[in-house]
Amino acid sequence: MTFAWIMLASTLNFFYKLPSSNEFVDDEMHSVELDPIDTSIKQLKVYITGILAFYATILGKPNTSNSQCIWCDLRPKFLGMKEMLTSASKWTIEKLKAAKARYDFRTSRSRAKTHKTEKGVSASPLITAVEPEDIMFPVLHDQIGLVNKSLDHMVAYVEKHVEKLGDGHAKTRKDLLAAEKATEQALDELDQSAVSTKDLEETMDLYEQLYGLLDKIFSDLRKILPSEEELVDLEDAIKYARVIWIERLQISCTPKAHALFDGHALEQHKRVEGLGDKTEDFVEHGHQLGLRDERRTWNIRNFEACQRSQIRNTRRRNQPIINDIIVQVTEGRNGRM
Ligand SMILES: [Zn+2]
């Protein structure tokens, strides 16, 4: 009976403390009237959050996160091309399984050692209970990726047109002078790439606008329950950033850029009522812990021994009893002070 009570209580929407038998005879307790029990079934929605490489692996598309989109099957060379978006269809678990079957059929008939993937698919999906559309756009890692990419682009521009270092490679003027013929030819090329101060200022202005927009976009994507007005505002910002990225600065459209500029991020942000509470920041925290472990064990040459040491450390870090003792000791120390 008590067990049934606990089961029932745990399904209720409110928190109610079960009274002990003594409390039942208490007059005050008898006067308490409970709200009618809400027996409606609440559906839980499950989302997956993580980084693109992890998503690609669980969808059966390992090692494709730098070329293929997670959510649609748009061909890599069409990423960022608005007019080609209609040629893509959204991935579902069923479609992924069908692609894997086609891949298996093709590879079984071929003698080649390596095989072309089927739109990125070369393995079975690992998690079939969650559809790809419920795999969340990685707000933090997309931001890191886009900002790094556009910074590299800007540095290459400045090296080529202002510092005249060639295509941003390691060739410095000093190296060029060492070979006179090459120097003359290279300088000729560089002269042709010279830009006017006006062009330079305009281009730098575009980068400045782009960073302002990216700043706004990624902080907006961290909102929970965005209002209609905020969504329109965000859509405009993405549209402007897209024009600068693809048309004006002509930075290449990677899967990360495609996910933001071709609509996946905004569609999800609307549908799941804000990506703010579904971000993958914890992954970055995990990366840092991993890096620390790697640094701690860098001198262990034997791979197995190195892995054992890292696993031992992770286990120790996640051990509730040890963590509890750490909290008690810290509190005790604070109390004494
Ligand atoms: Zn896509």
Image (cartoon, rainbow, N blue to C red):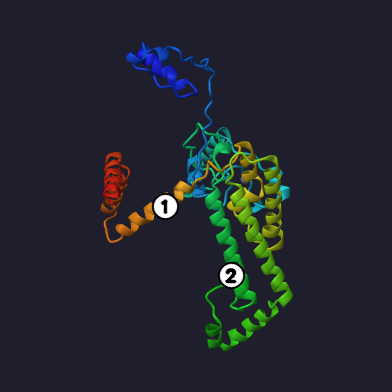
Residue type (three-letter) at the residue carrying disc 1? His
Q: Position of residue 138 (x, y in %)?
A: 54, 47
Mark 1 close to ligand 1, CB under 8 Å: no
Is 60 placed left or right of 309 in the picture? right
Frontmost residue, 72 versus 221: 221
Q: Is residue 26 above or below residue 171?
A: above
Can residue 249 be spotted in the picture? Answer: yes
Residue type (three-letter) at the residue carrying disc 2? Val
Q: Position of residue 81 (x, y in %)?
A: 69, 52
Instruction: Indicate the quadrant of ligand 1 in the picture.
Output: top right
Q: Which residue is mark 1?
A: 287
Mark number displayed over residue 155: 2
Residue 168 quadrant: bottom right
Identity of the residue drawn at 52% across and 52% down: 141
Frontmost residue, 16 versus 191: 16
Q: Is residue 5 above or below residue 77?
A: above
